[in-house]
Amino acid sequence: MAAVSRHLARRNAAQALYQWLMTGQAPADIESTFISDDGMSGSDIEYFRHLIENIPDVQPQIEAALAACLDRPIARLDPVEHAILLIGAYEVLFRPDIPHGVAIDEAIEVAHTFGAEESYRFVNGVLDRLVSARGEA
């Protein structure tokens, strides 16, 4: 059950971070909207909060690491892919308790749900390069 609730937290966090990227709205305001919504049922709300509160704080570090793994500037990323990559890269860079394979697989699953048809391939490639660049397989 914990894996399912973490997966749902990542899915909801991808939506919340997309909203943050598109509107510049404060993460705390977005958080309250999501948590009051019934769509969070079964989700690990604490992990959702952790993601949307911490990722904006380290966005410059995440994007600096991602920039070396991308074939285009960050500003030209699809906003959905951008949000998904922020979560996956955050977990790779800042969550040593989460195996890199899990972080990548989860990002791929979220990309299947919300991304364009081939988004999951792009997300997989970028996060694989990020892990390789860190010298960690």
Image (tube, rainbow, N blue to C red):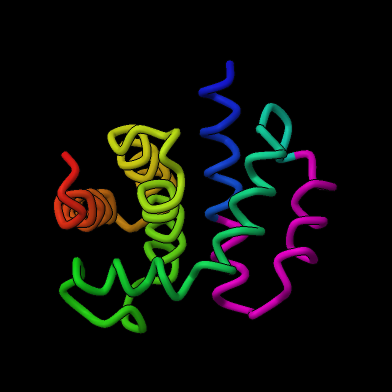
The residue shown at (54%, 24%) is: 4
26 within the magenta span: yes
Towards the viewer: 67 or 84: 67
61 vs 136, left or right, is right
Give the total of numbered labels.
0
Towards the viewer: 96 or 127: 96
Quadrant containing the N terminus in the rendered view:
top right
Residue 27 percent across, percent down from the top left: 70, 66
Residue 132 percent across, percent down from the top left: 15, 50
110 vs 31, left or right, is left
- In the rendered image, the vertical position of residue 102 relative to residue 116, given as above or below: above
Residue at far top of view = 1
The residue shown at (66%, 59%) is: 53
Q: Quadrant of residue 54?
A: bottom right
- In the rendered image, the vertical position of residue 41 relative to residue 124, given as above or below: above
Q: In which quarter of the image is residue 136?
A: top left
Residue 107 percent across, percent down from the top left: 37, 45
The residue shown at (56%, 32%) is: 6
Residue 7 percent across, percent down from the top left: 51, 33
58 within the magenta span: no
- Main secondary structure of the magenta stretch: helix
Quadrant containing the C terminus in the rendered view:
top left
5 vs 116, left or right, is right
**Magenta highlight range:** 15-38
